């Protein structure tokens, strides 16, 4: 029997009802600082990036100021973030390119963005979505997991999931879809133990191993010839909620 098709419109209506204006959690001031924050966030948490950029962006929120700051001083601001040596190099190099080719502006074009050092497809998608309101799907680990678990957009690779999302997410939800999915994956449909009892998508979701609040008590089968142990009375539990 074919799997039931997930009702994507209902899926996003419910996430939208909970959070009508979803926002990413990276702090930024303008498209340039957004680009820098996303480059720094590769394999790092948004919270760790925000901590580092709070002081950095006070001194350097344009490519010109970033170049003037220089690689060594930049490293001083971001040294608490993983891979900071490479990331500092990339931020200085991309600042130089933005000045040389784009008059110091961040281009609103995927190919041009992906030519910048340290900028892959996911980073370009985040910048296009947040800074330029393009309905892109930036597939990170949370979106990849949620899309596969629920059956919204199954795929073996981030690119395959991105394509499936583009096909399956209804037009009217596309602009904010990636934020709703990230936040739901981060706080409810968590990697180790999804919080299914508190999930508004529970009846739509196709995940077969949904969690429950009930304690996992495996009923022991009596051995052949042995009588079953008498049932214990549940103590102290009220039926009313
Ligand atoms: S029901 Fe569970 S597995 Fe499905 S989306 Fe919600 S939290 Fe994730």
Image: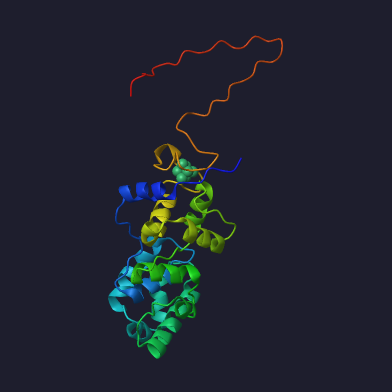
Q: Quadrant of the C terminus?
A: top left
Which picture quadrant has residue 228? Answer: top right
In the image, residue 148 lies at what x, y percent?
53, 51
Q: Nearer the viewer, residue 52 or 2?
A: 2
Horizontal arrangement in the rendering, residue 31 relative to residue 120 (left or right): left
In the image, residue 220 lies at what x, y percent?
61, 20
Direction front: furthest residue: 1
Rendered position, 27 above or below 66:
above
Q: How is the image coloured?
A: rainbow
Is residue 74 at all visible to an observer of this figure? yes
**Looking at the image, which residue is at 64% across and 19% down?**
221
**Looking at the image, which residue is at 35% across and 76% down?**
32
Rendered position, 173 above or below 103:
above
In the image, residue 25 lies at what x, y percent?
35, 60
**Looking at the image, which residue is at 57% across and 56% down?**
155
Which picture quadrant has residue 126? Answer: bottom left
**Looking at the image, which residue is at 39% across and 80% down?**
107
Is residue 79 at all visible to an observer of this figure? no
Q: Quadrant of the N terminus?
A: top right
Direction bottom: furthest residue: 100
């Amino acid at each position: 029997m074919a799997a039931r098709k997930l009702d994507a419109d209902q899926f996003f209506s419910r996430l939208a009802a909970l959070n009508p204006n979803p926002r990413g959690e990276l702090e930024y001031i303008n498209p340039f600082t957004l680009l820098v924050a996303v480059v720094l966030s590769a394999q790092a948490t948004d919270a760790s990036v925000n901590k580092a950029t709070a002081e950095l962006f006070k001194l350097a929120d344009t490519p010109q100021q970033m170049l003037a700051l220089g690689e060594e001083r930049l490293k001083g601001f971001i040294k608490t973030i993983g891979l900071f040596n490479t990331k500092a190099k990339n931020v200085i190099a991309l600042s130089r390119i933005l000045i040389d080719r784009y008059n110091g502006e961040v281009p609103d074009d995927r190919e041009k963005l992906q030519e910048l050092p340290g900028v892959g497809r996911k980073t370009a998608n985040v910048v296009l979505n947040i800074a330029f309101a393009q309905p892109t799907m930036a597939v990170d680990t949370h979106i990849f997991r949620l899309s596969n678990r629920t059956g919204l957009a199954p795929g073996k690779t981030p690119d395959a999931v991105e394509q499936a999302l583009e096909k399956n997410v209804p037009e009217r939800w596309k602009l904010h879809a990636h934020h709703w999915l990230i936040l739901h994956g981060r706080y409810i449909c968590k990697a180790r133990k999804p919080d299914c009892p508190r999930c508004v998508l529970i009846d739509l979701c196709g995940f077969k191993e949904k969690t429950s609040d009930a304690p996992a008590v495996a009923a022991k089968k009596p051995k052949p010839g042995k009588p079953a142990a008498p049932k214990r009375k549940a103590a102290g539990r009220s039926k009313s909620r």
